[in-house]
Image: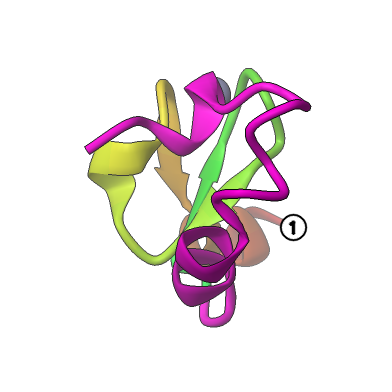
Amino acid sequence: MKKLCKINRKEIRQSMPFVLSVVAKPRYICEQCARVSSDKSLLCKPVKIKDYKQKK
Ligand SMILES: [Zn+2]
């Protein structure tokens, strides 16, 4: 599976069903790209969103 972070702007449209399915209920955010995903293996530098919310 291609990482969400590696999808380029030309691939976004054709990957949309997949993209929507992983960003709908995000649990992780990529610290390098600001992309979000429910699956951390799809991000290059995943961090739990929950952890950030608690750090505030
Ligand atoms: Zn990334």
Q: Residue furthest bottom?
A: 25
Name the spot of residue 40 as percent of width and height, x first. Answer: 30, 47
Residue range in magenta is: 1-25
Q: Quadrant of ligand 1?
A: top right
51 horizontally vs 14: left or right: left
Name the spot of residue 31 as percent of width and height, x first. Answer: 60, 27
Quarter-of-image position of residue 35: top right
Residue appearing at x 55%, y 59% in the figure: 19
Quarter-of-image position of residue 41: top left
Residue appearing at x 60%, y 53% in the figure: 52
Name the spot of residue 38 as percent of width and height, x first. Answer: 39, 66
Label tally: 1
The image's colour scheme reads rainbow
Residue appearing at x 32%, y 31% in the figure: 2
Residue 55 forms part of the magenta stretch: no
Residue 15 forms part of the magenta stretch: yes
Name the spot of residue 9 as percent of width and height, x first. Answer: 77, 27
Residue placed under numbered mark 1 in the picture? 56
